Each structure stands twice: as C-alpha cells, then as structure tokens.
Amino acid sequence: MPKQHKKASKSQIMLRIIMIMLGAFFAAAAIELFLLPNQLIDGGVIGMALIIHHLAERIGFGVLIVTLNLPFMYFGYKQIGKTFVIASIFGTVCLALFEGTLEHYHLAAFVDEPILAAIFGGLLLGVGVGLVIRNGGTMDGTEILGIILTKKLPFSVGEFVMFINVFIFTVAGFVYGVEQAMYSVLAYYIAFKAIDVVTQGFDETKAVLIVSDYYEEVSDAILDRLGRGTTKLHGRGGYTDHEKDVIYAVVTRLEVTKLKSVIHEIDNEAFITIMDTHETRGGRFKSAIH
C-alpha cells in the first residue's frame, strides 16, 4: 500500500506565510534603504525592475516586480507545481506592497557609501530572499524560466541564470556607470551567499568515502573516537576486480582533520574522498558545533 503524504498543519502553513512576509519585508528594506539610494541593483527580475524604474520613475517598482514575475509564474505552474507558484506570487506581492509603503514614507538611506550599501544591502536582501525560498517560494522568475528553457537548450539552470545576470549588469554599467555596476555585482554576490546560509544553514557537513583493507578497525575507530556512525557499502576494485567494503560517514567540517588522523593511524594507505553536503537530516546525526 503506498504511503500517504502528510499535509502541512495549519500552524505550519501560518508560519510559512509569516516567514515569507518577513523575507519580503527584508528584501524591500534592502532595496529602499540601501540599493536604490546608492543606484545599486541586484540580479534577476529585481535587477530588471530596478533598471526600468530608474529609467522610467513613473512606473513604480512594485508594479514592475509583479508584472515581470507573473509570466514566469504562469509558465512555471505546470513545471514546478501549484503550491510553489502560490507561495511565489504571495511573496512577490508582499515585496511590492512593502517596497511601496517604505517608498511612500521617503525614508533616508542608511548609508551613503556605495561599498557599505553593497555589503549590508546585499546581506539584508539575501536574508529576505532566502527566507522566501526556504518557505517554498521565490521572488525571482528567472530561475523558473531557466528550469523551463534548459529542458530544450544545452545549458544548465545555473548557466542560464548567469547569462541573464551578465546581461543585466552590463546594462547597469551603461545606465548607472561602471563603478555602480561593479558595486552591484558585489551586492549580488553577498546576497547569493546570504541566501545559501539561510536556505542551507550554518553547519557545513562533509560526506566521506573510505576504502581500506582495515575497514572494520577504521569503522570502529570513527565510532569510538569521533562518535560518528558509519555505513558499509560493498564495492569492487576496477583494477584488481577484488571485492572491498567501502565506509561511508558524515562529519562536520571541524572533525575532518581528526577523522583523517584517525584513519591514517590505522591505515596510512587508505583511500579517502571528502565531499561537501548541502544538508544533513535524519538518523542520529547531530552537529558537534551545538
């Protein structure tokens, strides 16, 4: 019998709504208090909207961000799903409303230095966008367009978004000047990194594959000295065709050095592969940082 999918509770849905609204407010504050006063932009649809708003001030940013995003949301409905599109439209509308409200009060810019505006504006914008993404939506339709088009084009979504952003920042160079475009790239990079932190968390975990003739001893040592459980995978050497047990373990970045030391004490010729992981959940894994 297939497993029934558990629907989100009302409290979970309400929390998501609140977090999307909070994310949209942070993004609006970043745009109105840091980016716009210093003639800086972000990438994607937000960047397009800011450039058009600069060239035609009569068209409000809120109107632009909704108008530019709606076609992407429409085409993404079948590709990504109704829940995602509803959350994205809600986040985009909230961004437009918050930005319009802040613009109405004509608040003074927090800083006049472009470098500070790029750093703190990018950070606040990234936190805001990250909160929306973490709660099931987006405020940038270019990635949705990328998902749709890359199914027919020989490009990845990341490559498509990068191409769009290169075009946007090039246009920004002509509209705002080269220096402002360069500061805008800095703001975008900081926002991009902040999004990663919000969506993936601060904890960096590493997935480790270990090939050793002393797999039992290595596995026991990892459990005893690091307190980490391991999984044994069956493998076969491509050169020797001999069967081998491969040890799989997940550790924090702070434990990597100790892990390598423990392994080399037992088997100095062990083959170790260490990979980044975006998120670790379930089982008995708990970060040693906490």
Image (cartoon, grey):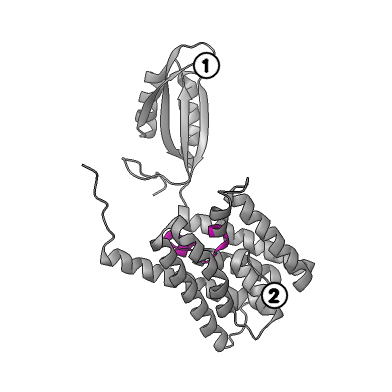
The one of 246 and 168 positioned closer to us in this rendering: 168
Label drawn at residue 238: 1
Write the residue at 41% across / 26% down: 247
Q: Is residue 151 visible?
A: yes
Write the residue at 46% across / 36% down: 207
Label drawn at residue 262: none
Point out residue 80 in the picture as x, y percentages from the top left corner: 45, 56
Label 2 residue SS: loop
18 horizontally vs 126: left or right? left
Write the residue at 46% across / 11% down: 242
Q: Are marks 1 and 2 in contact (CB under 8 Å)?
A: no
Write the residue at 69% across / 75% down: 39
* Amino acid at the residue labelled 2: Gln
Q: Is residue 81 in the magenta section? A: no
Q: Which residues are magenta?
A: 130-144
* Amino acid at the residue labelled 1: Gly
Point out residue 98 in the picture as x, y percentages from the top left corner: 50, 79
For the residue carrying disc 2, how many other residues have a C-alpha within 10 Å: few (<14), some (14-19), or many (20+)?
many
Q: Is residue 134 in the magenta section? A: yes
Which residue is farthest bottom?
A: 105
Point out residue 221 in the picture as x, y percentages from the top left corner: 38, 25
The one of 158 and 72 positioned closer to us in this rendering: 72
Discs 1/2, front? 1
Looking at marks 1 and 2 on the same chain, the residue that comes earlier in the sequence is marked by: 2
Label 1 residue SS: loop
Q: Is residue 243 above or below residue 65?
A: above
For the residue carrying disc 1, how many other residues have a C-alpha within 10 Å: few (<14), some (14-19), or many (20+)?
few
The one of 229 and 278 positioned closer to us in this rendering: 278
Residue pointed to by mark 2: 39
Q: What number of labels is visible?
A: 2
Alpha carbon separation for disc pair 1 and 2:
57 Å
The one of 194 and 167 positioned closer to us in this rendering: 167
